Image (spheres, rainbow, N blue to C red):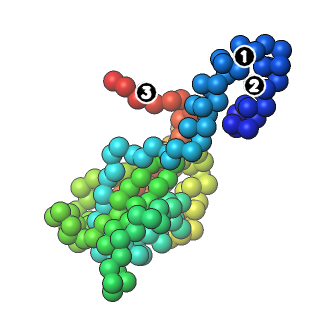
Amino acid sequence: MKPVDLARKLRRDAAFEPAALDRGKEALMATIRQEIQPRTSSAIIPQLPYADIRAALAFLDRAFGFREIPASRMEGADGVIHHALVEFGGGVIGIGTQGAHGAVSPQRGGIESQYISVAVADINAHYERALAAGARIAKAPRAVGAGPSAYEAFDTEGHRWRFVPQRLREVPTTV
C-alpha cells in the first residue's frame, strides 16, 4: 500500500478508535522508509572481461535483455568504456576491460572457463529473442515434463550463458 493510502486509512480508523493511530504510525513510517530507500544492491557481482565492451553491452541488451546501469559506466577521455554494470531480474554483472585482474574473454583465451545461469520468465520467448539477435546457440530448449528446459547461448566473445525457466518459489536467503 502506498504511504498516502495508508495515511488515509489511518485517519479513518483513528476517527473511530484513537489508539489505531499509534498502532499504525510505525507501519506508515516503515512504508515511507521502504519507498524512499534505494533498492538493495547485489552482494555478489560476477565480472566478465570483454575486448569490446561497447559491442558487448549492445549485444547483451539486444539478445538477452540486460540493461546497463548508466551511472556505473566508466569511460576514458578517448571514449573507450573500461567498465559498466548490467542488470537483469534483480541480478547485476560487471562488464570489464580485457586483461583486468588477469581475466580474458574466451575469445582471447581460447577456452570457456565458466558460464552464467540466468532465470527468465518465458524461456521460449527469450530463446527466440536471442536467435533473432544473432546469438550462437549451444543448446536449444526442448520440452521436458511440464515445460521447456534451459537453453545455452554464446555472446559475441564466447562467454556461455545458460537461461533457465524461472521458478515460482522463493530461494532461501539463509543457510
Q: What is the residue that sits farthest to the left in this orientation?
A: 102
Position of 102 compared to 97: left or right?
left
Tags 1 and 2 touching, CB below 8 Å: yes
Q: Specify the amino acid type for callout 2.
A: Leu
| Separation of residues labelled 2 and 3 (CA atoms) | 34 Å
Q: Name the element at disc 2.
A: helix
151 and 101: which one is in front?
101
Q: Residues within 10 Å of mark 3 (few under 14, many from 20)?
A: few
Picture layout, residue 101 above or below residue 33: below
Picture layout, residue 146 above or below residue 103: above
Name the spot of residue 152 as percent of width and height, x first: 43, 54
Q: Which numbered circle lies on residue 20?
A: 1
| Disc 3: which residue | 172
Corner quadrant of residue 86? bottom left
Name the spot of residue 21 as percent of width and height, x first: 71, 20
Picture layout, residue 175 above or below residue 137: above
| Disc 2: which residue | 10
Q: Earlier in the sequence, mark 1 or mark 2?
A: 2
Q: Name the element at disc 3.
A: loop
Q: What is the residue that sits farthest to the bottom in this orientation?
A: 78
| Separation of residues labelled 1 and 2 (CA atoms) | 7 Å
Q: Residues within 10 Å of mark 2 (few under 14, many from 20)?
A: many
Name the spot of residue 146 as percent of width and height, x first: 59, 34
Q: Residue at x 73, y 38 (%)?
A: 4
Mark 3 vs mark 1, foreground winner is 1
Q: Specify the amino acid type for callout 3.
A: Pro
| Separation of residues labelled 3 and 1 (CA atoms) | 34 Å
Q: Specify the amino acid type for callout 1.
A: Ala
Q: Residue at x 53, y 35 (%)?
A: 167
